[in-house]
Amino acid sequence: MAWDSPSDDGGRDASRQGTLGDDLERSVAYAEQLMISINRARSRLRTFRLVQVALFFVGATMAVTLALSVSLSPAGSAGSELQPFTIYLPIMAGIVGVAGGLTFFVGPLRRQYESDLMTTIEITRAVREVLPAVAKRENWTEIRHGTMRARLSRFPISDRSGI
């Protein structure tokens, strides 16, 4: 697309001439709002994963404790072999159930996170691509152009950019 051509209005009518910069500003503002959502989702995902790992660790510790208590219990004591099972088994089942249940929260949150991230990347990629031409065409000040470049530098370039 020839942005520098004075006759090319980018598919806009003459009454809207000069609003491409405003469109870019609104696009970046929307991407910034998405980044807030992305950061919250990433924080929640980390919290859910940490809780899952902790619960599985507690469950594994209880399983080892149960196995040791059964193997070390004195032989011949009536009912003492079943006592650890009646205490630990329901607790372990509950812990593993809660840890597994967190997966139902993680899936939708992960999908929303990835969707918002890809949308943000697409928006900022498009803005980066046309920014120099729009800034030149609309005679942006160096401050406005520099501010927009600084805002864009805060966004990931790809989904593998370490977000």
Image: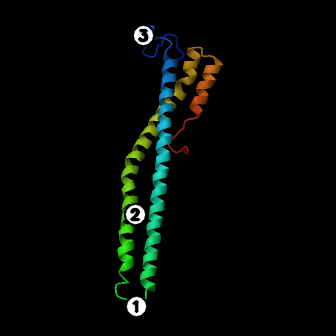
Q: For the residue marked with disc 2, what is the amino acid?
A: Ile
Q: For the residue marked with disc 1, what is the amino acid?
A: Ala
- Mark 2 vs mark 3: give the one in front: 2
The mark that comes first in sequence, 2 or 3, is: 3
- The front one of 18 and 108 is 108
State how the image is colored: rainbow
- Mark 3 vs mark 1: give the one in front: 1
Distance from label 2 to label 3 (Cα)? 63 Å
Residue neighbourhood size for the residue with mark 2, other residues' Cα within 10 Å, grouped as few (<14), some (14–19), many (≥20): many
- Label annotation for residue 52: none
On the rendered structure, is 53 left or right of 86? right
Q: Residue furthest right?
A: 142
**Residue plotted at (48% across, 23% down):** 26
**Can residue 127 be seen from the camera position used here?**
yes
In this rendering, the answer to whether 91 lies above or below 65 is above
Residue neighbourhood size for the residue with mark 3, other residues' Cα within 10 Å, grouped as few (<14), some (14–19), many (≥20): few
- Label annotation for residue 95: 2
Q: Quadrant of residue 132?
A: top right
Residue tagged by mark 3?
A: 13
Distance from label 3 to label 1 (Cα)? 92 Å
Residue tagged by mark 1?
A: 75
Q: Residue furthest top?
A: 15
